[in-house]
Image (cartoon, grey):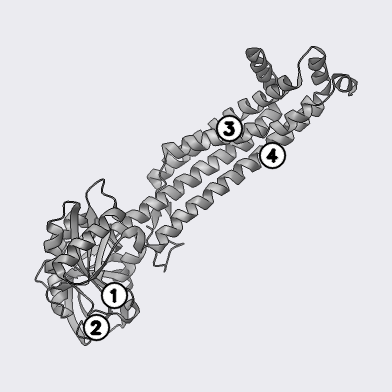
């Protein structure tokens, strides 16, 4: 009997092609939109996580315990002892690589143009990130030399080029003012637009000399070995570093430090509800179409009832019709969504103009990432929701008396 109902359901679908296509299209569009949306959010999430861990916080960040409270006052004197932190991290088996950095606000002499400098150990940075790959022209600065590499956008805005010399002024750790003249030896193009338009990088030893921070750094960014959870590792690293340094420090995981990433993860939950709304919206078309089918097939329903098809069997028949339509519609929708995502994962979505002037941790070009698990979830979820939507009109059909249906004209 189940095979008979399935064949009857397929026949009914093929007999009413326009209505079937309409219902399937509604579900397909919903499935396609949600696959694309989930892929975009996944791409944004992965991109932001990479940028945070590479350019801003590392997986775990070491900083002076009072720095964040006083950050608005540019507290260059609130530093950490690089030697003691280095000694502790060298002994930690959970740590893969780490880099010392000094980030300082500055002004270019003669233009009063504000920018942000980063003092870095370029030998260590090469293990931490692909700096060579980010170079657009020139080379990396060398330790011991008054050299810098500058964001390509910043150089363009200042009308500077390779070989030009720039005098940088900033506040020192002693709360005084100092200046240093640096030669531009490299131009970089990081994926984050704000890094290219506001930042320049200088050798760590020259930065320490310039800012009167010999032996100290502002922060240490840590990347952990694969499989090590940053939230679990941070307290252990904190204990080891503080024991070695003898002072309290602010050592936290990147998830705890970034409110923007937390908001993005929260947005993912919101989009799950948006997905449900889309599917329910698509399901209303199936409900409406099935109701229309019921009224148009009243005599057929009466005949089926007279031949002995009971209410439950009628419900199964309409349920099977809705299930087959949603399976086909969802399959086409998911397939189109996957194809669109795969194409965009190569070409990317350019947010350069939209993010112009914004200091945001997301790259200017975002590449959506397809998740097999979420894509499968979208397919089965859309089929289940759309199939369940047929119960409302199906129950109505099951309650119709055969005699009453046969009289229907």
Q: CA distance from mark 3 to mark 2?
A: 62 Å
Which residue appears at 21% of the width and 82% of the height? Answer: 172
* In the displayed structure image, the side of residue 111 where residue 307 appears, left or right: right
| 160 is higher (above) or lower (below) than 122 | below
Q: CA distance from mark 4 to mark 1?
A: 55 Å
Which sits in the foreground, 288 or 131?
288
- Say few, some or many: other residues with alpha carbon within 10 Å of mark 4 (under 14 / 14 to 19 / 20 or more): some
Which residue appears at 59% of the width and 31% of the height? Answer: 329
Helix, strand or loop status at disc 2: strand
Which residue appears at 19% of the width and 67% of the height? Answer: 242
* In the displayed structure image, the side of residue 379 where residue 141 appears, left or right: left
* In the displayed structure image, the side of residue 270 where residue 241 appears, left or right: left
Earlier-in-chain disc, 3 versus 2: 2
Between disc 4 and disc 1, the foreground one is 1
The numbered dot on residue 67 is 1
| Image location of residue 403, percent across then percent down | 88, 19
Q: Determine which residue is flagged by label 3.
A: 383
Earlier-in-chain disc, 4 versus 1: 1
Q: Determine which residue is flagged by label 4.
A: 284
> CB of mark 4 within 8 Å of CB of mark 1?
no
Which residue appears at 68% of the width and 22% of the height? Answer: 316
The numbered dot on residue 171 is 2
Which sits in the foreground, 291 or 310?
310
Helix, strand or loop status at disc 3: helix
Earlier-in-chain disc, 4 versus 3: 4
Which sits in the foreground, 200 or 159?
200
Q: Residue furthest bottom?
A: 176
> CB of mark 4 within 8 Å of CB of mark 3?
no
Q: CA distance from mark 2 to mark 1?
A: 16 Å
Helix, strand or loop status at disc 1: loop
């Amino acid at each position: 009997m189940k095979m008979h109902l399935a064949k009857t359901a397929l026949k009914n679908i093929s007999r009413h092609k326009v209505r079937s296509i309409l219902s399937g299209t509604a579900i397909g569009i919903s499935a396609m939109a949600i696959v694309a949306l989930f892929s975009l959010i996944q791409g944004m999430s992965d991109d932001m996580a990479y940028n945070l861990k590479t350019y801003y916080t590392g997986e775990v960040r070491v900083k002076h315990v009072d720095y964040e409270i006083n950050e608005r006052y540019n507290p260059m004197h609130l530093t950490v002892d690089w030697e003691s932190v280095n000694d502790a991290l060298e002994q930690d088996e959970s740590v893969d690589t780490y880099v010392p950095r000094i980030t300082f606000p500055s002004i270019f002499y003669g233009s009063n143009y504000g920018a942000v400098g980063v003092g870095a150990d370029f030998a260590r940075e090469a293990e931490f990130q692909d700096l060579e790959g980010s170079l657009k022209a020139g080379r990396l600065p060398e330790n011991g030399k008054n050299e810098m590499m500058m964001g390509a956008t910043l150089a363009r805005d200042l009308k500077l080029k390779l070989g030009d010399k720039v005098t940088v002024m900033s506040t020192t750790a002693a709360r005084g003012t100092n200046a240093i003249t640096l030669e531009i030896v490299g131009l970089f193009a990081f994926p984050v637009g704000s890094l290219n338009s506001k930042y320049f990088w200088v050798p760590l030893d020259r930065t320490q000399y310039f800012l009167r921070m010999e032996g100290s750094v502002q922060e240490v960014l840590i990347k952990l070995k694969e499989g090590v959870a940053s939230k679990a590792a941070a307290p252990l690293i904190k204990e080891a570093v503080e024991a070695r340094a003898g002072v309290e420090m602010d050592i936290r995981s990147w998830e705890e430090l970034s409110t923007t990433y937390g908001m993005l993860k929260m947005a993912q939950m919101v989009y799950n509800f948006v997905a449900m709304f889309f599917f329910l919206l698509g399901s209303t078309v199936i409900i409406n179409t099935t109701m229309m089918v019921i009224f148009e097939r009243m005599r057929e329903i009466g005949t089926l009832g007279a031949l002995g098809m009971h209410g439950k069997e009628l419900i199964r028949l309409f349920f099977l019709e809705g299930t087959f339509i949603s399976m086909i519609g969802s399959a086409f929708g998911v397939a189109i969504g996957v194809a669109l995502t795969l194409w965009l994962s190569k070409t990317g979505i350019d947010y350069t103009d939209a993010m112009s002037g914004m200091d945001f941790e997301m790259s200017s070009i975002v590449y959506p990432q397809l998740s097999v698990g979420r894509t499968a979830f979208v397919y089965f979820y859309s089929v289940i929701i759309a199939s369940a939507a047929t119960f409302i009109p199906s129950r109505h059909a099951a309650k119709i008396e055969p005699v009453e249906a046969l009289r229907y004209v």
